[in-house]
Image: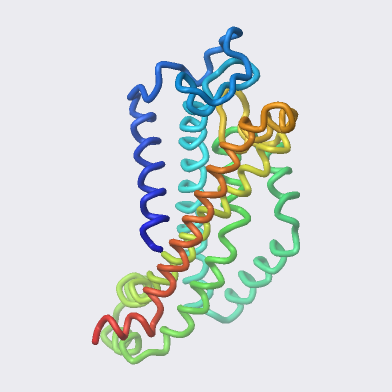
Amino acid sequence: MVLLPLVFIITITVLTVLYACGLDLSVYDYDTINTNNILQAPCWAHWMGTDALGRDLFIRIIHGAKMSLAIAFLTALITFFIGTALGLLAGFKGSWLDEIIIKFIDFLYSLPDLLVLSLVALFVSRSTTGIVLGLAFINWMDLARIVRAETKKYKHEDFVEAAQVMGLSDLQIVLKHILPNISSSIIVALSFTVPRSIIAESTLSFIGLGISPPNTSWGTLAGDAWQFLRSDPHLIFFPALMIFLTVYCFNNLGDRLRDYLSPQKAGEHLL
């Protein structure tokens, strides 16, 4: 079962990297309009058909993968830095600082995610940067709470107290002794951040608040194809299928990582 998500993720990542590096995966360009090929069904010339402007859907889906995956991974990266830093700070320092951070997280939890994303898209920009910042803003809280809880658990361990007796600074203790021990929990949390970001970006793009043309993502492809649902269902089927498979595979991969990196499993591996 673990091979399915790995094979799919590797395949779509390789295709995206090849496309991003300029390798021609098709004789067609993703934004070249061809009025002679409007709304063609899937065929040998166009594996996934063409859209309302005669553009090849396969190459547009690969281009959309570049945008969707780039946004998801950049969101996970920013989430890692913000969530880990604030979680470590709250968990290790505790006291009033911990209370302030937790109250701020609780306040952010009370805001609807779609509302926050829509406001960021409207007031910051509909660029990749604006979307990434908005997604990171609603994702870092979960990681911060996980890191905080794990840090509180480890900061009273004997090896941490020994490091304090040896005169190590708080920063050295956190980076050398606590962070390595909670890295598995961080990895698992980030593996679920990627599919959540893909769904959130697709939702924004679907309702018209996502990536601005001429750039495209899987969400914009699905949004543009909605009006052709009855007459040309292939237009929405293929981008929706890519979203489904990618999210399923990353969620499955996250579940496998959680099982493998859990404390019980780690003990089994050491034995």
Q: Residue furthest bottom?
A: 158
Residue plotted at (51% across, 32% down): 61
Q: Residue furthest front?
A: 43
Q: Is residue 123 visible?
A: no
Q: Is residue 235 visible?
A: yes
- Residue 32 in the image, given as x and y percentages of width and height: 52, 13
Depth order, front residue of 246/238? 238
Depth order, front residue of 254/136? 254
Residue plotted at (38% across, 62% down): 2
How are the colours assigned in the image? rainbow
- Residue 64 in the image, given as x and y percentages of width and height: 52, 33
Quadrant of the frame with the C terminus: bottom left
Task: Give the image quarter of residue 186.
Answer: bottom left
* Numbered circles on residues, count: 0
Q: Residue furthest top?
A: 36
Determine whether 86 is above or below 137 in the image: below
Q: Horizontally, is 97 left or right of 153 in the view? A: right
- Residue 127 in the image, given as x and y percentages of width and height: 59, 33
Determine whether 64 is above or below 214 in the image: below
Determine whether 268 is above or below 52 in the image: below
Q: Horizontally, is 117 left or right of 189 in the view? A: right
Depth order, front residue of 169/217? 217
Determine whether 88 is above or below 220 in the image: below
Quadrant of the frame with the N terminus: bottom left
Residue plotted at (51% across, 58% down): 82
Residue plotted at (46% across, 78% down): 151
Depth order, front residue of 235/207? 235
- Residue 121 in the image, given as x and y percentages of width and height: 68, 39
